[in-house]
Image (spheres, rainbow, N blue to C red):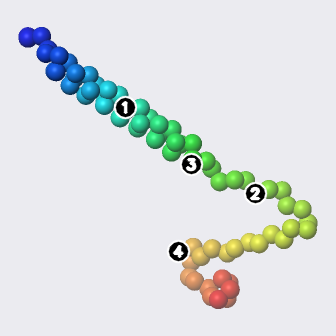
């Protein structure tokens, strides 16, 4: 095998650095995604002065009741 010319060495170095930069960027993005997908906050303890509102949700396996859902 022939030795690399200085231009080939520089090109190889640039390719290797670009690959390393891509790997580091992908790792950073994965860390950012896992950091921002925090579970929903827990409901704070309510005292008697704070009204609690319960919303009834329609489930697909039930017939829709307009009176039950406030319509």
Callout in the foreground (2, 4): 2
State the residue position of label 1.
Answer: 21
Callout in the foreground (3, 2): 3
In the image shown, does 23 or 6 lie closer to the viewer?
A: 6
Q: Earlier in the sequence, mark 1 or mark 4?
A: 1
Residue 14's place in the image compared with 69, above or below, is above
Picture residue at 41% right of the left edge, 38% below the top = 26
Q: Earlier in the sequence, mark 3 or mark 4?
A: 3
Q: How many marks?
A: 4
- Whether tag 2 and tag 4 are in contact, CB under 8 A, the answer is no
Callout in the foreground (1, 3): 1
State the residue position of label 2.
Answer: 43
The span from disc 1 to disc 4 (Cα, nearest Å) is 47 Å
* Residue 42 horizontal/vertical position (percent): 73, 53
In the image shown, does 15 or 70 lie closer to the viewer?
A: 15
Q: Earlier in the sequence, mark 2 or mark 1?
A: 1
* Residue 41 horizontal/vertical position (percent): 69, 53
Badge 4: few (under 14), some or many (20 or more) residues near its Cα, within 10 Å? few
Picture residue at 16% right of the left edge, 21% below the top = 7
Q: Quadrant of the N terminus?
A: top left
Which residue ends up furthest to the front in the rendered image?
A: 6
Label 2's element? loop
Q: Earlier in the sequence, mark 2 or mark 4?
A: 2
State the residue position of label 3.
Answer: 37
In the image shown, does 62 or 25 lie closer to the viewer?
A: 25
Callout in the foreground (2, 1): 1
The span from disc 2 to disc 4 (Cα, nearest Å) is 26 Å
Q: Earlier in the sequence, mark 3 or mark 2?
A: 3
Q: Which mark is residue 60?
A: 4
């Amino acid at each position: 095998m022939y030795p690399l010319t200085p231009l080939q060495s520089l090109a190889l170095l640039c390719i290797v650095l670009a690959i390393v930069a891509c790997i580091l960027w992908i790792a950073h993005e994965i860390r950012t995604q896992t950091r921002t997908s925090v579970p929903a906050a827990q409901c704070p303890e309510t005292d008697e002065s704070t009204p609690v509102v319960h919303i009834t949700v329609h489930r697909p396996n039930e017939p829709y009741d307009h009176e039950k859902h406030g319509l």
